[in-house]
Every structure is written in C-alpha cells, then in structure tokens.
Amino acid sequence: MIVQRVVLNSRPGKNGNPVAENFRLEEVSLPDTINEGQVQVRTLYLSVDPYMRCKMNEDTGTDYLAPWQLSQVVDGGGIGIIEESKHINLAKGDFVTSFFWPWQTKAILDGNGLEKVDPQLVDGHLSYFLGAIGMPGLTSLIGVQEKGHISAGSNQTMVVSGAAGACGSLAGQMNQNSHIILCGQISQYNKDVPYPPPLPPAVEAILKERNIKRERFMVLNYKDKFEPGILQLSQWFKEGKLKIKETVINGLENMGVAFQSMMTGGNIGKQIVCISEDSSL
C-alpha cells in the first residue's frame, strides 16, 4: 500500500524561524499485512502545536521530548479510524488518538499506544479531541485549578496573556497578590534562551513587592486528572458553557504551512489539519 507522509526536511536552527520548507511530503510503502497487537489506521485529523518547535532542534532542551530526525516521519497529536485490527481491545471502526501519531495518510501502529475515544463526548467533532476536549483543554483546566488558585464567587480577575491560541482561548493568569501560570511562551521558542526566560531585575522586584508567585506548569505531571478533566470539558461543551474555536487547513501536503502559520499567530483557537473525513459521523 502506498501512502503519503511528511518528514523533517531541514532544521531551522535554535535561533531560526521555522518555515514550511522545513517539512517534505513523500510517498512510502506500507506492508500488506499487520502483526498481532497492531492496527491499520486512516488518519482523520492532525495537530500542530508550539511545543513541536523544540522537536525541530537536535537538542530539544527537555528530557520529555525527543527530537525529530532528518528525513524521518514527523509525529504529534492525531485522530484516526481503525481499518484493520489485530489488537484484542480495538476493532475496525473504532476512533483512536495518540500523542505520537505519524504525519501520514495511513499508518500501521501498535495498538497499546492508542487510546479509544467516544465521538459522543464531542458531538461528533472528532478534531476537538486534539484541542478543547484534549491536551490543550486539559492544560487550561488543570493549570487554572492547580496553579491559579481560583475559586467560584471570589470576584478574582483572570488575565490571558495569549488569548488566541489553543490554550489561551480557554484560560489564563491573575493580578495583585496573585499567581502567574507559566505554560508555554511561543514568542521565545525561536530563540536559544532558557525556559522560562529570566526576568529583568526591575520586574523581579515588582513580583516580590506585590507578592506575585510565578510558577511553571506542565500538564503531563497531572495524568491522574486527565480522565475527569476530559469529562468535565465535554460536559461544559455540551451545556454550551465552553465555546470552542478552531482553524482548519485541509490536506497532508499543508502540514508545513499550518505549522508556520501557527507559529506566527495565523490561527484562532486550535490549529488543525484535516487529512480525511469519516462519512459515518
């Protein structure tokens, strides 16, 4: 079977701006059969996210992100449908997701690395599992709950420093005697600086004077809260309390274009690339 895939064509450098040409579309042949424990999937939606900028470097600067390799397939958040299964817990027609989904039109994956998702949680909008009812939504929800110290009815103020993106359109930070939640600073990702970037002495003095706590937050440290968090986000969405925004580009060939656009503020809400659509929904 011949499928299309996107590979890393070149690196922008730690101090460079990524461009669409850093990625390359090519064709590759998949085996005609799958092994026990594997599934063959058709990709429906792929995600592009700011953290991927770190994976474009030979050294990602973190111990939880592995770098993409030159001329090798790129991966990230994805949603697809199973077309063939030899995994005991997964069947043909199941919708599945993974944080390490290859940028391919179709793929053969280890079933143990996939999570089955229920379309009813998102009223059939499967791409939402890559955004508001997925990792970005969990990042916003858990970040506010764990680091924002926000309570209902307390007349607190929330300020969102970047309110147009996947996380910023859902949550934010606060004011006097407050908590600044550091979770991604896309404006710094094209610079070879430590994260979080150090503050000027004058700003540090203001934080100390006003008793403002500045904390780094990473959602992967709260995996025990993922399941209830997804159910809460789904409930708010169905009740109309959660307004979900997406920017969708069609076609695997446009993955590089979508990534470059996302890194330069071209998206409102979550940036999604539609690879194929499922007619059963």
Image (spheres, helix red, strand yellow):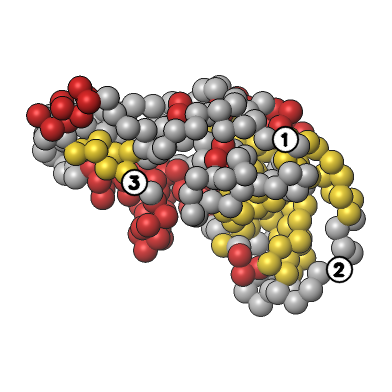
Q: Nearer the viewer, residue 189 or 240?
A: 189
Q: For mark 3, does the 10 Å Cα neighbourhood hold few (<14), some (14 to 19), or many (20 or more) residues?
A: some
Q: Position of residue 185 (x, y in %)?
A: 42, 32
Q: CA distance from mark 1 to mark 2?
A: 32 Å
Q: Which label sits on residue 145?
A: none
Tell me the mark number nearer the camera, choosing from 2 and 3.
3
Residue at the image point whose x is 74% and y is 48% from the top: 73
Q: Position of residue 280 (x, y in %)?
A: 69, 51
Q: Which residue is mark 1?
A: 10
From this view, report whether residue 43 is shown above or below residue 174. Answer: below
Q: Earlier in the sequence, mark 2 or mark 3?
A: 2
Amino acid type, mark 2: Thr
Disc 3 to disc 1: CB gap under 8 Å: no
For residue 18, above or below residue 138: above
- Work out whether mark 3 precedes mark 1 in sequence or the reverse, and give the earlier one: 1
Give, as a three-letter code, the residue at label 1: Ser
Secondary element under disc 1, as helix, strand or loop, is loop
Nearer-N-terminus badge (1/2): 1
User: Pointer 2: what residue?
Assistant: 33
Q: Is 145 in front, or is 65?
A: 65
Corner quadrant of residue 137: top left
Residue at (72, 40) in percent of width and height: 8
Q: Nearer the viewer, mark 1 or mark 2?
A: 1
Q: Secondary structure at mark 3?
A: loop
Residue of label 3: 217
Percent position of residue 144, x then y: 28, 43
Q: Quadrant of the N terminus?
A: bottom right
